[in-house]
Image: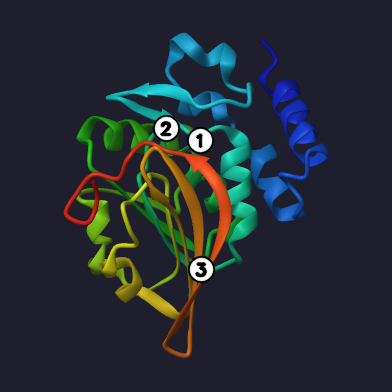
Amino acid sequence: MNHEKRRIELVTMLKKRGRIKKEKVEKAFLETPRELFIPEKIKEYAYVDTPLEIGNGQTISAPHMVAIMCEALDVKEGQKILEIGAGSGYHAAIVSKIIGKKGHIYTVERIKKLAENAKQNLKKANITNVTVKIGDGSQGLQEFAPYDIIYVTCAAPDIPDPLIEQLKDPGQILIPVGQRICELMLLEKKDDKITSKNLGGCAFVPLIGKYGH
């Protein structure tokens, strides 16, 4: 199976549909082999634009959703970013390409087995600027705060206060809010003020933890 060819076809389709607009997002998708981030038995579906089961009741997001989130945020080289919900490591891998070697992503995963898998997947993909931590992502990760950007890959009942506290000023938070069917909210912190924008409906597994469901 020619994964590279299918990766190019997927990116072409996402561009046609307006999901990928920025050149740096396109480049990141082309450089990140999704097949390394999904279980062996479903590798043939690596470049189908759909969420896939990765075990423990969790999924890897559909490529178009990862693209929407990358496009919504002002991700730049050299930034320090916090991701809540490592999953298989794929989303962090894409963002790691945009922030480059001088940037770093800290990603928090509550399920130990998934966290260990994400570490292995990132290693296979030769990605060295992502650190996977096991813990309650709804409380953020105070250890390395503050962050330029925080994004959440699971649906929260509301925006957790610790995430707002751990965000730089200026900074951005992207988070699905609601139940499994939720709204993707973009928050901007600037001059001690928070503004929010609803980017539309989406579907995510629930955020579990102190500030989760």
Q: CA distance from mark 1 to mark 2?
A: 6 Å
Q: Are marks 1 and 3 in contact (CB under 8 Å)?
A: no
Q: Amino acid at mark 1?
A: Ala
| Image: 193 above or below 101 | below
Which of pointers 1 and 3 indicates the residue nearer the eye?
A: 3
Tell me the number on the disc at residue 121. 2
Assess whether mark 3 and mark 2 are in contact (beta carbons under 8 angstroms).
no
Residue 33 horizontal side relative to residue 150, left or right: right
Counting labels gives 3
Local packing at callout 2 (Cα closer than 10 Å; few below 14, some 14-19, many 20+) is many
Residue 125, numbered circle = 1
SS class, disc 1: loop
Between 78 and 71, the one lying in front of the other is 71
Q: Based on the displayed image, in which of its 4 quarters is residue 66 positioned?
A: top right
Residue at (32, 66) in percent of width and height: 163
- The structure residue drawn at horizontal position 26% and vertical position 68%, both measured from the top left corner, is 162
Q: Residue furthest left?
A: 210
Q: CA distance from mark 1 to mark 3?
A: 20 Å
The kind of secondary structure element at disc 3 is loop
Q: Residue 52 or 82: which is nearer the viewer?
A: 52
**Neighbour tally class for label 1: few under 14, some 14-19, many 20 plus, Cα within 10 Å:** some
151 versus 109 height, above or below: below
Res. 92 visible in picture: yes
Query: Where does label 3 land, which residue?
Result: 79
Residue occupying image coordinates x 29% and y 38%: 115
Classify residue 212 as left or right of residue 150. left
Residue situated furthest bottom in the rendering: 191
